[in-house]
Image: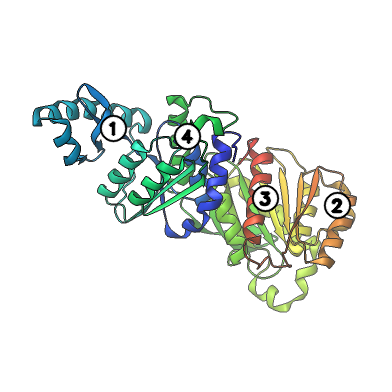
Amino acid sequence: MLFADRTDAGRRLAEALRPLAQSDPVVLGLPRGGVPVAFRVAQELGAPLDVIVVRKLGVPRHPELGFGAIGEGGVRIISDDIVRRAGVSDSDIAAVQEAEKAELRRRAREFRGERPRVPLAGRTVVLVDDGIATGATALAACAVARAQGAAHVVLAVPVAPPSAAARLRKEADELVCLSSPAAFSAVGEWYRDFGQTPDEEVVALLARAARQTGPRLTSDVLVEAGGVDLPGTLTPSGDSGALVVFAHGSGSSRHSPRNRSVAAALNRAGLGTLLFDLLTADEEAEGGHVFDISALAGRLVDATAWVRGHAPGPLGVFGASTGAAAALQAAAVVGAGRDTGIGAVVSRGGRPDLAGARLTEVRSPTLLLVGGRDAQVLDLNRRAQAELRCESRLDVVPGATHLFEEPGTLDEVAERARDWFTGHLTGRAA
């Protein structure tokens, strides 16, 4: 298996680690090369990212032979067997440890700055490196994480030789290794781009991750639109400054488990979200308002004005069912300007055809997501896309029906929506 670069390796590793997202993990990168890989893993799992700084204690005059390791928090692991066989005295241990302790503090301060170390007690800890050659550092990292209170230690790497993988399986509670080739000579041979990771990149990635996963207070709000107050749930944006409004034509947008799942994926990518109900409870009970696209679009236009008063950054709209038609009509009304309009639209199993003549006026980049087994809606989306005069794409999610209830299909929706919004609202890839 060949990886394009560390970001590609992190993306593929995250796919294998996805089941761990439900265990509230902490992701720790081994500096320096492991941090870009760990950054992508942490993004996908919605987990906090930190570094695990470990220093090997080398035998005097034979420093390549480690007799132990130290980590932050005063953690020390000593191999009594190696100490005895190498004749390492107590004074040797003290001298080596003191020198390495100073370097440990320096590197931790350089990478993390003034931020506190993420506590590991009782947590599932995912240790990530860009690859393993001998496994010595990874073994020490596993021991240090356990000594710092980790309840479950997962070691995750893109590539490692079979011999090292066998040793690591005994130390970690779980080893996730994407490739273990027999013909292994160096980690770098399994990457097209294996350039050095400078300290500055590690510092920047850790700071960015802290901004994305730091406390962002979700709040209940009332959105003034169409002369009524519509209840919503607002999560402010992270470092991107961009926010996505969810438009649901029927039922409650803010209580929809599918919308909430997609919103969580967008939040992990640093995007803010507003989930609000386009209809009042009484209007929803009456039933006929669901297909009043012009009225729904009018409320959505008012909602975008309300949002800009609270979050003036780039704005996108995620529409489902008839909410997708309302999103497209609203995009036609307010335009596609980055600072004043709707910068991107995503439709999930929507009815863009119901936007009618307004389709040709839409200038916002539009992604149409439809289940492969949702034949009627797929046909309507194909016809609607043919009328669009903006950048557009129709993505068919294989095996999915209208509600994307099949395993993995909603994750696919979330990933494609995330990539569309981050690309068009922030100018960067997810």
Residue plotted at (55% across, 34% down): 190
Q: Given the image, on which type of amino acid does mark 3 rest?
A: Arg
**Residue 416 circle label:** 3
Residue plotted at (13% across, 27% down): 92
Of the two numbered discs 1 and 4 in the rendering, the one whose residue sits closer to the viewer: 1
Query: Cα distance, mark 1 to mark 4?
Result: 22 Å
Q: Are marks 3 and 1 in contact (CB under 8 Å)?
A: no
Question: How many neighbours does mark 4 have within 10 angstroms: few (below 14), some (14-19), or many (20 or more)?
Answer: some
Of the two numbered discs 4 and 2 in the rendering, the one whose residue sits closer to the viewer: 4
Of callouts 3 and 4, the N-terminal one: 4
Whether residue 292 is visible to the viewer of this picture, yes or no, is yes
Query: Cα distance, mark 3 to mark 1?
Result: 40 Å
Q: Please say if 125 is above or below 371.
A: above
Of callouts 4 and 2, the N-terminal one: 4
Q: Please say if 245 is above or below 280.
A: above
The residue under label 2 is 385
- Left/right placement of residue 224 relative to residue 113 reads right
Q: Given the image, on which type of amino acid does mark 4 rest?
A: Leu
Which image quarter is the C terminus in? top right
Question: How many neighbours does mark 2 have within 10 angstroms: few (below 14), some (14-19), or many (20 or more)?
Answer: many
**Residue 55 circle label:** 1
Counting from the top left corner in percent of width and height, residue 17 is at: 50, 52
Of the two numbered discs 2 and 3 in the rendering, the one whose residue sits closer to the viewer: 3
Assign a secondary structure to mark 1: strand
Q: Given the image, on which type of amino acid does mark 1 rest?
A: Arg
Q: Are marks 2 and 3 in contact (CB under 8 Å)?
A: no
- Left/right placement of residue 405 relative to residue 379 reads left
Residue plotted at (69% across, 51% down): 317
Question: How many neighbours does mark 1 have within 10 angstroms: few (below 14), some (14-19), or many (20 or more)?
Answer: many
Query: Cα distance, mark 3 to mark 4?
Result: 23 Å
Of callouts 3 and 1, the N-terminal one: 1
